Amino acid sequence: MSPKPILQAKNIIKKYRMGTQVVSVLNSINLDVYPGEVVSLLGKSGCGKTTFLNIAAGLERPTKGEIIIDGHLLNKISESKMSVFRRKYIGFVFQLYNLIPSMNALENAILPLVFEGIPAREREQKGRELLKTMGLGDRLGHKPSEMSGGQRQRISLARAIINNPRIIFADEPTGNLDSRTTKEILDLLISTLRKNGQTLLMVTHDQEVARHGDRIIEMADGKIIGEKVM
Amino acid sequence: MRKKDLFLMANQNLWRRKARTILTCLGVIIGTASIVVMISLGIGLRISMEQSMAQWGSLNIINVHPGMQWDESGNPTGEEKRMTDETVAELAAIPGVTAVSPQYNIDGEAKLGRKEGYLNIVGLDPAVMGELEFSVEHGRLLAPEDRFAIIAGSQVINNFWDERAARRGGMMMDGPQQQDPAELLDQRIQLTIRNQAGNERKQNFFVVGILDEKNMDRSWQVYASIHDVKRLRDFMMKGANNTGQMGPMAKEVMYSGSGMMVASTVKDSPSRGSRKDDRSNDYDSIMVRAKDVAQTKEVSQELRDRGFNAWSMADSLKDIENVSRTMQAILGGIGGITLFVAALGITNTMVMSIYERTREIGIMKVIGASFADVRSIFLTEAALIGLFGGIIGLGFSYGASQVVNKIGADYIQQGMMMGGPAANISVIPAWLAAFAVVFSIFIGLAAGLYPASRAIKVSPIVAIRNE
Ligand SMILES: Nc1ncnc2c1ncn2[C@@H]1O[C@H](COP(=O)(O)OP(=O)(O)OP(=O)(O)O)[C@@H](O)[C@H]1O
Ligand SMILES: [Mg+2]
């Protein structure tokens, strides 16, 4: 392992206030993820995986603790700068794909480049090539509603990696797919990442899925309870 | 994010909900159209007023009469102002006044060859006639050395008719014929005046110029040197007060004027007359020229403050301006309220749109849309609604304006005979069109501010946490 982690979670604590009650969701999570690693975060439903992933990706603030991505302390980045930071360093894959229904496959995949200000021609060419390698070359003009779950998730993957982020976060990326499609998607995602030396932190409750990672972190009740290197 | 992408995206977003966008635009369309048409009515009204005003008389000329002041119950207060050379000098000294001439008026029967008619003669200081906005279409203006020369208004020739010819040919059946004003040039007109003692005098006038037709105020009069008019006036006065001196005065009047002109306004000065309160030589009125319309109003007011009777076209213009300004304010206000409601419509639409697209906004933020991007998208959408509404509304305004003008033209032509070319009552100048579009964009932007600030606050978490 290279000595410098790309993602460091230091003593992350997250509490939610529910009226008078305070729910402790994450209890002092410490995790280092190194460049090029594929890490699976495995745990039962409700153990706090999503919460941790969101905090690690800067979508949510921890109650306590620090997140450092590629040397940048996220706590110090303001809400308005966070989007720009994410655009540069982070890709995100959602369980429910979260594509924009009014845009077609190509438009969805290249949306991050639109916000980055890349000229239309350049970004469309890049998007076309990427979607082709993901087996969607003949679906570029289709709207998400006209595509299967596996196809949608492939668009979502393309969108997450199109601007070459250093680290990709995926929350149950195959949660809604059958086992065959799940394997296809994971193989595609991981092989693409390997080519570019990118890092993946993936959340799942499925042992099979977790096994695709280099390392499996096991979580329960807001704590890390074990780690397995594959 | 590039401007082009921003506009494309905003435009695309708008047309995802066609019906709602069109309905929202409709508010802006109606608001813009009503504001534009209403302002155009105000502008058109003012322009046509000013045009007809300029036709009726010069806007910079003030006619000053000896003021008789009355209090509220109708009793005269104070003494009537006198019109003497001191008065002329006093008026000339008022700031904003560029020319002043004393004025005598006389009238009498006149003959133009075989034609008979009537002559209103206004005597003015020939030296300042040019500055008093007299301009001739034919011939020339009066020169100070002219003796019994006149320039005639464009309609003066229509004061003369050949009665015998008319009787013969039955021409009068058709009413007076329009005659070419130029025919009067270089003609000799013989004026007949009588004094109170019953003496009669005939005086020939030579027409050296014809006034141009613009100024209807002056078109039925002829203008002569005040010295000539004074002479005739003195003759007419004779029978009245100075009967004893009739001999020598009559002689002076008979003096034909072919010799050197020695008398000046100052020498003729009424104030240097024999008796102090002899007002018979006071001027009938004084004509004052102000620098421009604005000065005219100020000078008129100053004159009234000093106790004179001052009247100018600009005064009437001021009233009309007030009416038209009030009207514009009322009409503009109605349009403004409509647009305000339209703006609320835009805000409402955008807020609804944000509710619907909360998830989408969250996703965009997760994948790298900055605050500025999100704000820009929603502001652009709102501005586009304003722009579309503004442009279509402007289109409707042009249509409505034409309809109003068509109806107005028919009405005016029915209503009055001498309308000339019917003026448009609704005028949309380029600046108004530009203003309308810019303003509706601005309305859209303003209406989009609040929704945009809400869009910014949408948390990216909502994109991930379903429901
Ligand atoms: N905004 C919130 N307010 C209060 N409690 C919350 C909030 N978000 C999450 N929780 C709670 O935190 C706990 C962990 O939620 P989380 O979504 O992280 O679980 P998870 O491990 O991702 O589960 P799953 O596998 O079902 O997605 C849950 O008990 C949930 O009720
Ligand atoms: Mg979860």
Image (cartoon, rainbow, N blue to C red):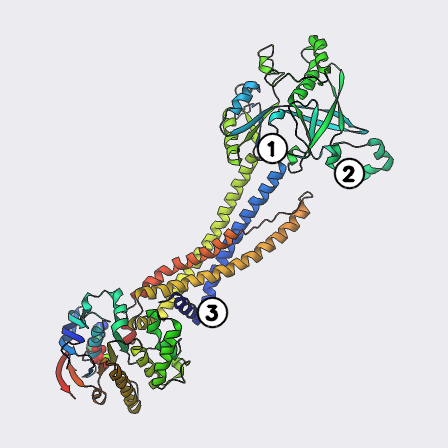
Same subunit, labels 2 and 1: the answer reads yes
What amino acid type is highlighted by mark number 2? Gln
> B423 above or below A49?
above
Which disc is residue B133 wearing?
Answer: 1
Residue at mark 2: chain: B
Label located before the other in sequence (1 or 3): 3
Q: From what the image shows, is residue A25 above or below residue B113?
A: below
Q: Residue at the far bottom: name it.
A: A180
| Apparent side of residue A230 relative to residue B460 in the rendered image (left or right) | left
Circle 1 residues within 10 Å: few <14, some 14–19, many ≥20: some
Q: Amino acid at mark 3?
A: Ala
Could you say whether the residue bearing mark 3 is in a helix, strand or loop?
A: helix
Q: Is the shortest distance between ligand 1 and the CB of mark 3 under 8 Å?
A: no
* Cα–Cα gap, marks 2 and 3: 65 Å
Which of discs 2 and 3 lies nearer the camera? The answer is 2
Where's residue A192, x and y in %?
28, 84
Q: From the viewer's perspective, is residue B244 above or below residue B347?
A: above
Question: Mark 2 and mark 3, same subunit?
Answer: yes
Residue that label 3 marks: B19
Residue B106 image point, x, y percent:
68, 23
Q: Chain of mark 3?
A: B
Foreground disc of the pair 2, 1:
1
Q: Residue B114 appears in which quarter of the rendering?
A: top right
Residue B98's image quarter? top right
Amino acid type at mark 1: Glu
Closer to the eye: label 1 or 3? 1
Q: Residues within 10 Å of mark 2 (few under 14, many from 20)?
A: few
Residue found 47% across the figure and 59% down from its top: B28
Which residue is at a point 56% across and 56% down the rendered structure image? Answer: B398
Q: Nearer the viewer, residue A216 or A115?
A: A115
- Tag 2, which secondary structure? loop
